[in-house]
Amino acid sequence: MLGLERKDTLLLIAVAFITLFAPIILNPFPAGSALAQFNAGYPDLMQRFVIFGIFAIGFNILFGLTGYLSFGHAAFLGIGSYSAVWMFKLLSMNVIPAIVLSIIMAGLFALVIGFVSLRRSGIYFSILTLAFAQMSYNLAYSVLTPITNGETGLQLTLSDPRILDGASTGGLPVTSLFGAEMRDTTTLFVGPWSWDFSVGYYFCAVLMLLAFYLSVRIFRSPFGMMLRAVKSNQQRMNYTGLNTRPYTLAAFVISGMYAGLAGGLLAAMDPLAGADRMQWTASGEVVLMTILGGAGTLIGPVLGAGFIKYFENIFSKINDGILHQWFAFMPDGLENAMVAVIHPFIGKGWHLTLGLLFMLVVIFLPGGLVEGAQRTGRLFRRRDKNADHVESDAARQRAAAE
Amino acid sequence: MDAILIQILNGLDKGSAYALIALGLTLIFGTLGVVNFAHGALFMIGAFCAVTLQKILTLSVTTIDPERTDFLGNPMKVQTPYVENWFGPEMGATIIDWAVPLAILLAIPVMVLVGFVMERGLIKHFYKRPHADQILVTFGLAIVLQEVIKYFYGANPIPTPAPSAFKGSLDIGVWLGFDPYSIIYPYWRLVYFFFAGIIIAGVFAFLQFTTFGMVVRAGMADRETVGLLGIDIDKRFTLMFGLAAAVAGLAGVMYTPILSPNYHMGMDFLVLSFVVVVVGGMGSLPGAVLAGFLLGILQSFASMNEVKSLLPGIDQIIIYLVAIVILLTRPRGLMGRRGVMEE
Amino acid sequence: MGILEVKGVNKRFGGLQALGDVNLSVKENTVHAIIGPNGAGKSTLLNCLVGKLIPDSGSVMFDGQSVLGRKPHEINQMGISRVFQTPEIFADLSVLENVMIPCFARRDGAFRLHAYETVRKEAGIREQAETMLADVNMLEKRHMIASSLSRGDKRRLEMAMCLVQTPKLLLLDEPTAGMARADTNNTIDLLKEIKAKRDITMCIIEHDMHVVFSLAERITVLAQGTPLVEETPENIKGHPKVREAYLGEAQV
């Protein structure tokens, strides 16, 4: 279906199912129950899942396929956001032109930065992209203030022209898709459960599915095969009559456009754009998502993005009070000790957890969650096979005996 | 002329820090073949050694002074640092005043230990892994170290002043025949520059004149051959990592009066130091030092108002621009050896 | 007029004259060997032919066109394929993919953004690759990851990758270097088989005289960067100049 193999079609359907029913699936605990804090089914968080999913899917096309480790992809995210906010300011609050411009601008920047950076490979490429991203960040912070509004970040104002929308009355206008406001949410109450269906989330979700579908197509295309060949052996590529430079550049630009789309969507959900989005720690985050999920796999980056954004949210919300509740069943001394041990990792300590996670994954599970799942699967299968061996051995012995 | 001189001087202290960090990065890269993204964190840990010592020295005992009262009329509580009780008020105050230089004594063992633990515990397992993995795992480590420091010391910068003897400034202009006050240079920056010079000279002398250094240099040139000679390179490389960590740490300790330590200073310096290493030439120690000073001075020139009015924002990006141009035109860097990290 | 014409090629590395006035003519549909002691400039010459090095002077004409100043991938597109000393394959890809890539390169040129097509639907390319693999007796291994192949199979795969492009000239850089006798003989058989099945010009750089005399129709002896003689194998064996060049080396 859709020009995909069976396996990939199933994967796509599964992803589509989960994404479309996320507001229900991610809210397994009744509102108001003690476990409701683990619910993730509210629009703001779900939007971040899919938006960073797009970012990571795009990053994976570059890093997962070609092996080129960019440390500057956040720059394209930031460019996407700035472009989108400018469209909201100048043209219209409709998200479509904003997102189109985001993708185009990010693509253009990726073309220039990629053209220069891809002349080198390995660690030099990483450092070049890092240098470009830091440069963009510094510029956005200082000199380009007329465009980026420096430290404060770019915001909507009442005096913005918004040519197509005409003068706005009352407060600041909100982003919309041909009249459907992004922030519009319908809440459905079923028994003790409450599910939020938001326009913004579904808009992002559909785009993510589209982005995911395209990435599957790329992975399965001759182009994708060439990219894997680049990662495997550039010398052989050249001596096979293939020019590696345009292949890597195309991958770089495509992944930059994905980042631009993600940046544009961030701005479409919340019309703000700040330089922080371009900082190199933000680039590190998308690297982490991709690696954690499984670089070079189709679903890995989406998993990684969801995983990190979910735990970021949960860990940041947990405080000592909640911990005390959890460990209340323990004797007081032990309870306090447990809370004291866990305390550094929660709340504002989320980054510490993230850093540790990063190290653990790179050390023990370089293939990420997907590899972890495969290994576990193989473990079970091998056990089955061993059982077969035992049985067949027994059969042989029996036969020999007879 | 004096304007140029003052910019060169201004560039020296930052350049010294870049040079010291880049020197350590290059030592690690050259000997172990590892790209260490946690090296900036080592610089930061050094700086927090100074903070820690300052905190320890100012640990105080609270006593009540019956002769003085506070504004509510209660007897006043007086905080007296232990060191003042032990060594007498004057001696004690002097010790506290000299906390930053004294921190060197604390930082050396701490940094060497941190270096050993890092190398034996983590880096060792990554010698044979791809550079991307090394970058990623040390990046994770850098985040962890930074967050640990943030947890214990908070997010705000902690002022750590230089000893009062070095608080003033030196009127260099007068020495050189300019008008008084035309070139004013804080003493501490001068101290930092000389300190960096001594460390750099020390590292080079160590590599040049000791047998240990000779083996390490041979290892940098051709690791496999040296290994074949039956020399246990690994042990020496562990020591080398400790040395590199100590260099970064000391650079951090002494930098604290110039920049109040904060938890993200390591990352800030790391990116620039990497750029310095690349400009100097991956694997070249003199290249790292030269590029460190050059880029420090270049940055300081770019911050001149005359330059900034001509090219706004150039001070923010000059280092990156230079790095990009150098990487594209001279991939080996200023003094890089042939064949290091080339395709 | 040969398919490959090398005229007056010079190459210096600093003070070292690696190639001095090299002339060479490789005739179509022959196996031409270039031999010579270590440091004779064999590899330098080869690198000049494929675009990795650019000679200081002289000309290299292939099929009537100059290859000088062209990049390796352009030279390959002109019809020169190269087999390396240690097989250069796409180790992380499957055997079939390894052979499909050169097929794509032949059909689509040095670059094409075929990002929306599907490999699975490229029946023609697949068939071409599978036929080639069957030709070198590797069809049943097509789903293996190339890195898990034996050394001999890797060599076979690399040959298949080159041959599937139907090159006008196949360059082989010491294809049996470091091989055990049995593997060497297998490689010789493979090359003979290839030669028997199709019209192809081969240029072999080789150290092993056994390989050279089993395959070559013409032999050029290179010493100190200059060709000493060009002869048939029978005439090379007792040639005094060759003995001189190889003095102290293996017996010819």
Image (spheres, coloured by chain):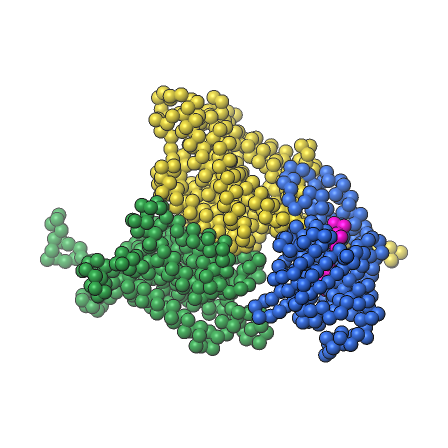
Q: Nearer the viewer, residue B23 or B292?
A: B292
Query: Could one spot residue A230 in this view of the protein?
Result: yes
Drawn side of residue B237 relative to residue B180, left or right: right
| Location of residue B248 in the rendering, given as x and y in whole percent from the top left corner | 39, 62
- The residue that appears at 63% across and 68% down in the rendered structure is C18
Name the residue at 49% across, 22% down: A178
Q: Residue at x 55, y 44 (%)?
A: A252
Q: Which residue: 59% across, 67% down?
A: C13
Q: Position of residue B206 (x, y in %)?
A: 42, 73
Q: Which residues are magenta?
A: C165-174
Left or right, A151 with reference to A87: left
Quadrant where the image shows the C terminus of chain C? bottom right
Nearest to the observer: residue B81 or residue C169? C169
Q: Quadrant of residue B52?
A: bottom left
Disc tally is 0
Tell me, what hue is chain A? yellow
In the depicted structure, whether residue B108 falls above or below residue A311: below
Q: Residue furthest bottom?
A: C248
Picture quarter with the N terminus of chain C: bottom right
Chain coloured green in this rendering: B
* Magenta region includes residue C169: yes
Question: Which chain is displayed in blue in the rendered image?
Answer: C
Relative placement, left or right, of C17 versus A166 is: right
Q: Position of residue A166 (x, y in %)?
A: 40, 21
A319 or C110, which lies in front?
C110
Instruction: Name above or below for residue A21 compared with residue C192.
Output: above
Percent of width and height locating residue A355:
47, 51
The extreme right residue here reads A402
